[in-house]
Image: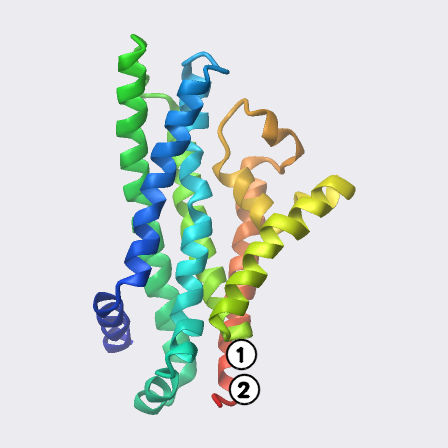
Amino acid sequence: MNSLIKTEVLKLRTIRSPWLLLLAAPLLVTAGISGMVLSGNKPLDAAAQSGALAHVGLTSLFTMVFGILAVAGEYRHRTITDTYLTTPSRGRVISAKLLVYAAFAMLSGLVSSLVGLGVAAAWWSDKGVSFAWGDTAMWTTIGGGIVWNAAFAAIGVGVGALVRSLVGAIAVSLAWVALVEGIVGQLIGGLARWLPFNAGQALGAGTGSMTTSHLLPRWDGGLVLALYTLAFAALALTTSMRRDVS
């Protein structure tokens, strides 16, 4: 298993697109926090700190696509055959991808958090407001956002294994988040809170936000997201072992 993990890391080191994708995450956090401060809609208090760092969780959209690349990207470039010929145990290959991509997504979330903290602290200082580094709610939001990033990377691996078409998998995933969860949220609010993106929002949401009223409690959302992650990981394993490569 260690050799498979090293192989996946080596693959990531030799291609640029996943890294460009993850590089966009801290840029999104920077833009989101700066936009929140410049809009002037909220006082820069402890609740605003938590809301600002909630942008870390939103970068899970990037890590989801990052996870899709793990499998669907290999189908697109036709390297999946060589991968399975080198290691006929497909379950171990997919398990290695799940571990590696979730770990790098968690690292991406950590980097975005550090960038977000630096940007927020700089804005607070610029506005003459003390930044409360010891605020528990802010750190809980950050932790939830990092876990959300890792979970969505694993879900992305599952989606990539199920759909296999890189463009199709990305399109389906983004359409689900933007259309299905959004439409369901408007039509059947009680059901929407149990869907993956909304469960992630519950885990990584800032305290006191108006958008959290329709979400599950934080830890309930985390549990639901964990169940989705396990389900997609299981689907990735079973689908990859049973389906022909060609």
What amino acid is at disc 1? Thr
**Measured along the vertical axis of the image, is residue 200 above or below residue 48?**
below
In depth, the one of 185 and 110 nearer the eye is 185
In percent of width and height, residue 123 lies at: 31, 19
**Measured along the vertical axis of the image, is residue 185 above or below residue 176?**
above
Residue drawn at x 27%, y 14% as measured from the top left: 125
Q: Secondary structure at mark 2?
A: helix
Label 2 Cα crowd, 10 Å radius (few <14 / some 14-19 / many 20+): few
Residue drawn at x 55%, y 25% as measured from the top left: 209
In percent of width and height, residue 234 lies at: 53, 70
- 226 left or right of 30 in image: right
| Residue 121 can be seen, yes or no | yes
Q: Secondary structure at mark 1?
A: helix
In percent of width and height, residue 94 lies at: 41, 75
Residue 104 lies in what quarter of the image?
Answer: bottom left
Label 1 Cα crowd, 10 Å radius (few <14 / some 14-19 / many 20+): some
Furthest residue toward top: 128
In percent of width and height, residue 95 lies at: 39, 72
Find the distance from the CA under tag 1 to the CA under tag 2: 6 Å
Q: Which residue is mark 1?
A: 238
What amino acid is at disc 2? Arg
**Measured along the vertical axis of the image, is residue 36 above or below residue 238?**
above
- 109 left or right of 54 in image: left
Residue 28 lies in what quarter of the image?
Answer: top left
Q: Which residue is mark 2?
A: 242
Whether pointer 1 and pointer 2 mark residues with C-beta atoms closer than 8 Å, the reply is: yes
| Residue 159 can be seen, yes or no | no
Residue drawn at x 42%, y 52% as measured from the top left: 62
Residue drawn at x 32%, y 37% as measured from the top left: 113
- 120 left or right of 155 in image: left
